[in-house]
Amino acid sequence: MEEKIIGVMGAMPEEIRLLYEKMTDRGEETAAGVTFYTGVLAGRRTVLCCAGMGKVNAACGAQLLITKFGAGALIFSGIAGNMTDKIGVGDVVIGKTLLYHDAERRMIAESWPHLQEFTGDAAMIAAAEAACAEAGVKYIVGKIATGDDFVGDSATKNAIAAKCAPDCVEMEGAAVAHVAAKYGAPCVVLRAMSDNADENAYETLVAKPFDISEYCTTAAKICEGLIGRL
């Protein structure tokens, strides 16, 4: 049986760079304005990319990974706004459930695969849990809500909480899981909490330079550990 190729999507170019540096047999190709890096990582054939922010960019990157580069499983790693008191900044949510908080989900579900929410692959979630534990990172397996707006005020945060009660909020995860579901590809989304999705979030991530070096190092370590377990 042919080995399954693992597609890895990162929110930050720095995170992809760290993983790329650990790859062997490396190559690269550009499609739709996105650079895809191919090679072997943790003993598995892997394709890396940083597709950009937002649902369309994420969906386009995910589809190219599957249809152009032959990825049979997808991993997405990035940051998110915390929506729960179960964890804090720096901790991780592994997506068991992923949904859109800014869309009419019933209408979207009229098309294949007829889902209003999407589910992370059980085996990949288990591998992600083991990788987080090995890296010494606190995590929960929970619900991730996706939308195209940056959430940086309490009113918006509270409205999203009332609508779908997620553990974190971000801009890509459900789109990646949606594409994966269309193609029957297993996937997992990992999100490290960068802020609390409140008035301080904009200051942390937008108004002043955000030091992501520690996050990227940890995220790359988790991804590598996850890939090695698949």
Image (cartoon, rainbow, N blue to C red):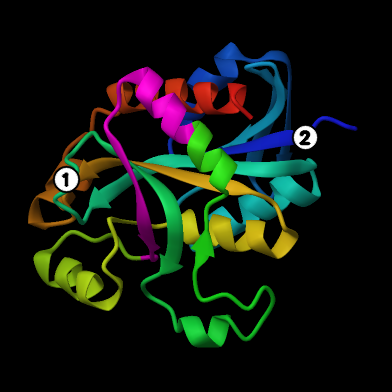
- Which secondary structure, mark 1? helix
Crowding around mark 1 (Cα neighbors within 10 Å: few <14, some 14 to 19, many 20+) is few
Q: Do tag 2 and tag 1 residues touch (Cβ < 8 Å)?
A: no
Q: Position of residue 39 (x, y in %)?
A: 72, 21
Q: Amino acid at mark 2?
A: Lys
Residue 136 lies in what quarter of the image?
top left
Q: Relative to 130, does residue 208 appear above or below in the rendering?
A: below
Q: Which mark is residue 4?
A: 2
Question: Residue tagged by mark 1?
Answer: 207
- The residue located at (57%, 75%) in the rendering is 115
Q: Which mark is residue 147?
A: none
Crowding around mark 2 (Cα neighbors within 10 Å: few <14, some 14 to 19, many 20+) is some
Quadrant where the C terminus sits is top right
Magenta run includes residue 138: yes
Q: Position of residue 141 (x, y in %)?
A: 37, 47
Q: Which residues are magenta?
A: 128-148
Instruction: Indicate left or right for 116 with 184 as reference.
Output: left
**Viewer-nearest residue: 74 or 59:** 74
**Viewer-nearest residue: 70 or 12:** 70
Residue 153 lies in what quarter of the image?
bottom left
